[in-house]
């Protein structure tokens, strides 16, 4: 039952739609039904959806996520981004599970959600503030227990990959949804209410939820990935031996052999962790660590996602940890997606290196990075304004000679895990109807019979994804990838955390089914989970077709430039094999 808020008129209504439990699926229905085809993402009539749903924010493992959804200024199709942390619980505690926001406020404003009511308030004095200062100011006004989703200057300046940051450190980063906030003159959403304490959430079977939480807590020492997430420096703290050549993006995916860049040691993170609120509500695993260099003016915004070190580091030819941590914290405070920023800067650096962008930035220059971040967020000068549009639009403006160096799909910059080594990831990047995301499905390497995670094979088999050598690209790879994508789409549709869930994390399919059943009080099965995943994918694809979204294709580099060294030497995505796998992918999902 979402609240429909019109920022232009100030009207608020409640929509009755019994039976919907999800996060994003109701939002897709509202976007398709309440907005006309071809509407500009910045038009006041565009719809922005924010939801915890019936599950998100419940005090239980894997149920902390909030979803943000709108037509993306970057891709022109449905952009969906999820925020971990306590914001979803704050939304529930304030008496609202979903908001659908239309219109444009007359002045910079924020929405206050309190005790089941929604109201609009002036935020003019917050203009230009970063997400941390905005959160502090709104908590000073509404209490330190308030939960805040805010944009920074990048969103106000309509940077096409501006992000939303919740509660200082938990970003909804992808697809430019912060710019949709900015176009609506919406600085923040503030939630005030009695957030249930752990174990006291409104669930049908508290005992079952408590049992699943105890199981999850015990699994942190036995599940390899959960143990890495829980420990220091954490899942996003790249340490140890460098990945094999071709595994990760280096210099705009142009270097797939020896590159000389280093991975930090665990000791390099000493003194850089920032005290935070800890794990997500109800979850014992503190996955998202907050890191920033000592002495940085705004350290609380340094929530470190797994892609940050690659996107702001290796992909730019930089391996200095403090440079990357400072840039990541600055991105979060300004409200910028580190993945799209890194991809756009890498595009500009390669163009400059090839003489196609005179005066452009250079690879491997840590001193210049802070200024580049600030220039993009403020759209300072011709270069800042150009790069604020993203790599695809920048290439269109600079001319066709630069187009091969825009590593984008549907206008969104690629995540930094190279698809040439993991073709299933490549299929997911290309075909996922909302655009490329690294966490849309589990990585191919995890299901390799030799190099994979054997404990996850049984879970994968339950959805028809048999283990297979990582390099294989054929029709079966297409079907397997579609099945994995459908599973993780089900997690996204219900706001279940992919970093806690099947097939590689502690919450198996049976645990997930039991968890949803315990919360909702009605039986929930694997078939229900997959049906939710299919419904989400179908809704996103239908919207993309309606809006004339970009093709399901990867940049030519992935098909033409093989890995040049290491155990994956020669890996490249053969075009004919890719097309065969893509056709099988479509067939598996019932798409034509």
Image (spheres, rainbow, N blue to C red):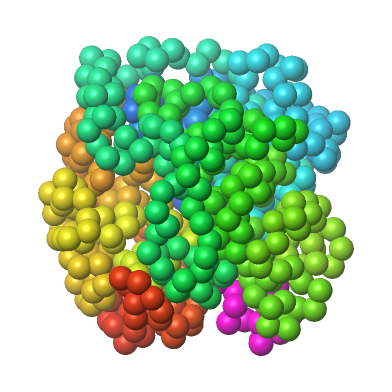
Residue 129 or residue 74, whichever sits in front = 129
Q: Which portion, as a residue range, is magenta? A: 394-407
Q: Residue at x 41, y 68 (%)?
A: 245
Counting from the top left corner in percent of width and height, residue 231 is at 39, 32
Q: Residue at x 80, y 63 (%)?
A: 385
53 w.r.t. 265: above or below:
above
- Determine if residue 182 is in view: no
Q: Is residue 354 magenta?
A: no
Q: Residue at x 66, y 49 (%)?
A: 323
Residue 206 or residue 11, whichever sits in front = 206
443 w.r.t. 103: above or below:
below
Counting from the top left corner in percent of width and height, residue 530 is at 25, 50
Counting from the top left corner in percent of width and height, residue 482 is at 28, 63
Examine the image and state in which quarter residue 168 appears. Answer: top right
Indicate the quadrant containing the C terminus: top left, top right, bottom left or bottom right: bottom left
132 w.r.t. 75: above or below:
above
């Amino acid at each position: 039952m979402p609240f429909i808020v019109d920022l232009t008129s100030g009207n608020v209504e409640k929509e009755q739609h019994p039976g919907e439990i999800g996060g994003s699926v109701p939002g897709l229905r509202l976007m398709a039904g309440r907005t006309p085809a071809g509407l500009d993402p910045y038009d006041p009539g565009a719809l922005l959806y924010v939801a915890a749903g019936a599950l998100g924010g419940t005090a239980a493992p894997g149920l902390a996520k909030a979803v943000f959804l709108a037509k993306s200024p970057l891709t022109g199709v449905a952009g969906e981004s999820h925020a971990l942390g306590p914001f979803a619980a704050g939304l529930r505690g304030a008496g609202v599970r979903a908001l659908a926001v239309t219109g444009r406020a007359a002045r910079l404003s924020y929405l206050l959600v309190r005790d089941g009511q929604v109201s609009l308030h002036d935020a003019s004095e917050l203009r230009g503030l970063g997400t941390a200062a905005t959160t502090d100011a709104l908590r000073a006004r509404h209490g330190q227990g308030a939960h805040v989703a805010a944009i920074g200057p990048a969103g106000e300046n309509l940077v096409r990959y501006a992000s939303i940051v919740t509660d200082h450190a938990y970003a909804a980063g992808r697809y430019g949804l912060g710019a949709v906030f900015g176009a609506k003159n919406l600085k923040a959403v503030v939630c005030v209410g009695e957030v249930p304490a752990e174990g006291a959430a409104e669930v049908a079977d508290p005992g079952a939820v408590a049992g699943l939480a105890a199981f999850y807590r015990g699994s942190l020492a036995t599940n390899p990935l959960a143990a890495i997430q829980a420990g220091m420096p954490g899942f996003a703290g790249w340490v140890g031996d460098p990945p094999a050549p071709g595994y990760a993006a280096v210099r705009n995916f142009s270097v797939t052999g020896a590159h000389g860049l280093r991975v930090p040691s665990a000791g390099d993170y000493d003194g850089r962790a920032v005290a935070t609120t800890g794990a997500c509500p109800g979850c014992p695993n503190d996955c998202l660590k907050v890191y920033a260099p000592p002495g940085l003016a705004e350290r609380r915004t340094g929530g470190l996602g797994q892609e940050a070190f690659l996107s702001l580091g290796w992909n730019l030819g930089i391996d200095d940890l403090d440079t990357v941590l400072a840039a990541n914290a600055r991105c979060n405070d300004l409200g910028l997606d580190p993945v799209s920023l890194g991809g756009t800067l890498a595009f500009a650096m390669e163009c400059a290196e090839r003489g196609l962008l005179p005066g452009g930035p250079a690879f491997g220059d840590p001193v210049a990075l802070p200024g580049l971040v600030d220039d993009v967020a403020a759209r300072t000068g011709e270069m800042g304004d150009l790069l604020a549009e993203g790599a695809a639009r920048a290439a269109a403006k600079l001319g066709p000679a630069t187009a091969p160096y825009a590593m984008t799909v549907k206008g969104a910059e690629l995540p930094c895990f190279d698809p040439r080594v993991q073709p299933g990831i490549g299929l997911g990047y290309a075909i996922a109807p909302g655009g490329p995301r690294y966490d849309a499905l589990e990585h191919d390497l995890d299901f390799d019979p030799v190099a994979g995670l054997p404990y996850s094979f049984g879970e994968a088999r339950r959805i028809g994804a048999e283990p297979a050598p990582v390099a294989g690209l054929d029709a079966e790879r297409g079907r397997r990838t579609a099945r994995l994508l459908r599973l993780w789409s089900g997690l996204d549709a219900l706001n279940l955390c992919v970093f806690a869930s099947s097939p590689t994390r502690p919450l198996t399919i049976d645990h997930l089914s039991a968890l949803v059943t315990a919360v909702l009080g009605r039986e929930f099965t694997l078939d229900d989970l997959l049906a939710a995943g299919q419904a989400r994918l179908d809704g996103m694809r239908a919207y993309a077709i309606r809006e004339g979204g970009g093709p399901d294709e990867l940049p030519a580099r992935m098909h033409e430039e093989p890995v040049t060294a290491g155990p994956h030497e020669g890996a490249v995505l053969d075009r004919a094999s890719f097309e065969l796998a893509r056709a099988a992918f479509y067939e598996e999902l019932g798409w034509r």
